Amino acid sequence: MQERMIQLRRTRSLFAYWRDGRLLFHNFARRLTVSANPIACEVLDFFDSWRTFQQAAVRFADYTPGSVRSSISQLVKQGLLVVNGSPEAAEDRRLAKEWSAWLPEGSFHFSTKDPPYVDFSNWSVARLKSILPKTQAPKIFKTVKGVAKRLLPACAAPDSEFIRVLMARRTHRRFSKEPLPLETVSQLLRLVWGTTGYLHTPLFGKLLRKTSPSGGARHPGEVYLMALRVKGLQAGLYHYHPGGHHLERISTNATPEKAWLYCGRQRYVKDAAALFLMTAIFRRTMWKYGYARAYRVVLLDAGHLCQTFCLVATWLGLAPFCTAALKDTLIERDLGIDGIRESVLYVAGVGLPPDGSSRKPAPASARLRPGIEDYFGATASTIFSKRRSPRRESQ
Ligand SMILES: Cc1cc2nc3c(=O)[nH]c(=O)nc-3n(C[C@H](O)[C@H](O)[C@H](O)COP(=O)(O)O)c2cc1C
């Protein structure tokens, strides 16, 4: 096809804003930010529906022909215009359709996927400190001044199993090389992501109940087991079906290296026995709540599930952890999900505690040892996401 007959349209995954006096366009689906002249707004407005180069040349006849062509080529290259029939155009259409109720606010979900991660594990504390903001860290407690203070009764927590588990929960980053029994994985899946019953409602029909709450009982969460070292189960990626309490094998593509890549190259993840890749099917929540605030509910739901996971794993004498430092697109590709209708949100992982350490939750008092975790908010091995610096290109 002749170049001038190629049809172009403005990407639907677009917002514009000003920063430091410069107009920036952000394609949130492709995470591309470019600066441009305000005239680009007029050009992008013109390409609201499929239009050709030739039509643009007529519309912008007042400009020199070469400059219109080069501006349009730039806009295509920078992902602000899509070409009819291209994979980008198909994905653009799918995203706009699937997320129409939650856009533009919901663009946050896409803008924040796949950030670059930097491994700071070998950095000294002094070097780490040097990259922290130069201002003082915010206070860890808030005190309301000028108001009456009311002391509360001493809290004598009964030495119950529940309190012991609650107090023993920690983020673990060292694991035994032993495999996890399949029964243990089954218990984790059952107690965290399994169904505990059904709600029968006149308006919404049959809804799920789980051990974690879910906004509107929509339960958008799904979970995939990445079995790395599970006795009696082939290493692989499995979808968990809560209704039937069974696994559906997606692939045998599960290695410690893959796990490490999934979780922003955090070293300790390589030693985990299993990961639980938590995703959401947004439509379940969006169907009922057609406003973007409900996106928060999807994230809050994932948080609830993860805390339940940490507590159940602790109760089972395991070493749990959770991480939001993810290579979203890589995980989604391996799971065979599109990242639009269903997207990964959070990863929980587990192993047996390192050899010699207790498998039972420690008494509450043993938990209060300060460690490097307490010093740096997380461990020094935590991977920080780089501070944002949008790619700026002029056109
Ligand atoms: C949403 C979320 C994301 C987290 N991401 C990471 C992570 O990427 N890497 C990591 O080592 N720890 C991660 N953590 C664990 C925290 O660092 C940990 O909870 C914190 O240091 C407090 O320690 P504790 O869990 O033992 O109480 C995450 C925790 C939460 C709640």
Image (cartoon, rainbow, N blue to C red):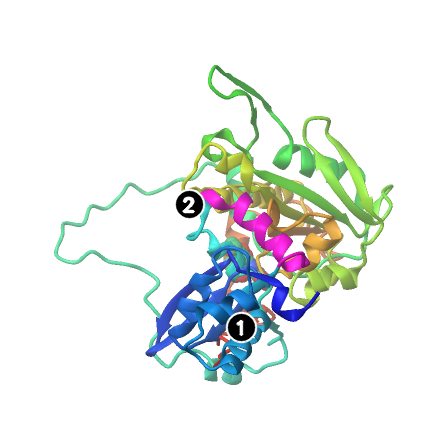
Q: Nearer the viewer, residue 33 or 269?
A: 33
| Within-10-Å neighbours for mark 2: few <14, some 14–19, many 20+ | some
Q: Regarding ligand 1, which quadrant of the image does it lie in? A: bottom right
Q: Nearer the viewer, residue 221 or 233?
A: 221
Residue 388 seen in the figure: no
Foreground label between 1 and 2: 1
Residue 72, numbered label: 1
Residue 292, numbered label: 2
Q: Nearer the viewer, residue 80 or 276?
A: 80
Residue 172 part of the magenta segment: no
Could you tell me residue 81's position as x and y percent? 55, 65
Q: Nearer the viewer, residue 321 or 345?
A: 345
Residue 326, numbered label: none
Residue stretch in magenta: 84-101
Residue 19 seen in the figure: yes
Could you tell me residue 393's position as x and y percent? 50, 80
